[in-house]
Amino acid sequence: MRILLIEDDRILGETLKDYLSLNGIDTVWIWDERELPKIIKKYEFDVLVIDLILKFTSGENIISALRNSGIQDPIIVITAKRGINDKENCFLRGADDYLTKPFDLKEFLLRLKALSKRKHLESIIKIGDIVINLDAKTVHRGDKEIKLSKNAWELLSLLIKKRGEVVDSETILNYIWPDREVGEEIVRAYIKELRKILPSDSIKTYPGRGYRLI
């Protein structure tokens, strides 16, 4: 699970990032919201966490801009604003949840997990005779479990999220190896690993464009 955190309070941002890391959640944190256009193109996120009171623009305007651009990732607002009108404004703009500061870290974690599940309503995926359980992170053919490497699983998960779309190598590299300098040859290697266990022609290659799970 990966979230985007937009929070200009350095202490709170660091605290949330560390806490989520301990709970197995990867956090991309930006404290300057002007970095958002670059970051939102670089990574795939399960949930977006947005503070309302920022330095250069408002969280409300960010929510509107994201929704107007077609981004449908779940959004949770974290803010010191407690008024019902503030909450109504955010929900009307497209927010999915609203949490007022200060808040309990465990509650924050629970809300993130609930929003993430809302995005991925279908947890059992079937591709031919292969059954994939996204929640349990397992792959089966009949009664036999098929073991995948961690990176192959991450690639399979991404292709499932984008099923029917052509996913380019840059998106794959940023999703699986965001902090490492690796080339397209490693993508091809893990595509090959997936093709060994998936039905024939499940993954289509589009030269110069990317890969598509049918």
Image (cartoon, rainbow, N blue to C red):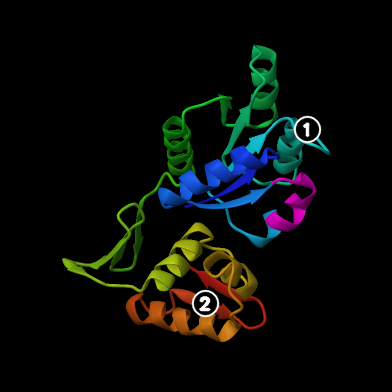
- In the image, the segment drawn in magenta is 31-39
80 or 132, which is in the foreground?
A: 80
Q: Position of residue 20 (x, y in %)?
A: 47, 46
84 or 195, which is in the foreground?
A: 84
From the viewer's perspective, tell me whether residue 11 is left or right of residue 154. right
Residue 40 lies in quadrant: bottom right
Picture disc at residue 204? 2
From the viewer's perspective, tell me whether residue 59 is left or right of residue 179. right
Of badges 1 and 2, the one in the foreground is 1
Is 32 part of what is drawn in magenta?
Answer: yes
Q: Position of residue 178 (x, y in %)?
A: 59, 67
Crowding at dot 1, Cα within 10 Å, few <14 / some 14-19 / many 20+, comes out as some
Residue 12 lies in quadrant: top right
Spatial CA span between label 1 and label 2: 42 Å
Q: Position of residue 86 (x, y in %)?
A: 69, 19
The answer to whether residue 167 is visible is no
- Name the residue type under label 2: Lys
User: Residue at label 1?
Assistant: 58
Vertically, is 68 above or below 35? Answer: above
For the point 42% across and 33% down, the residue is 106
From the viewer's perspective, tell me whether residue 40 is left or right of residue 107. right
**Magenta segment, prevailing SS (helix, strand or loop):** helix
- Name the residue type under label 1: Ser
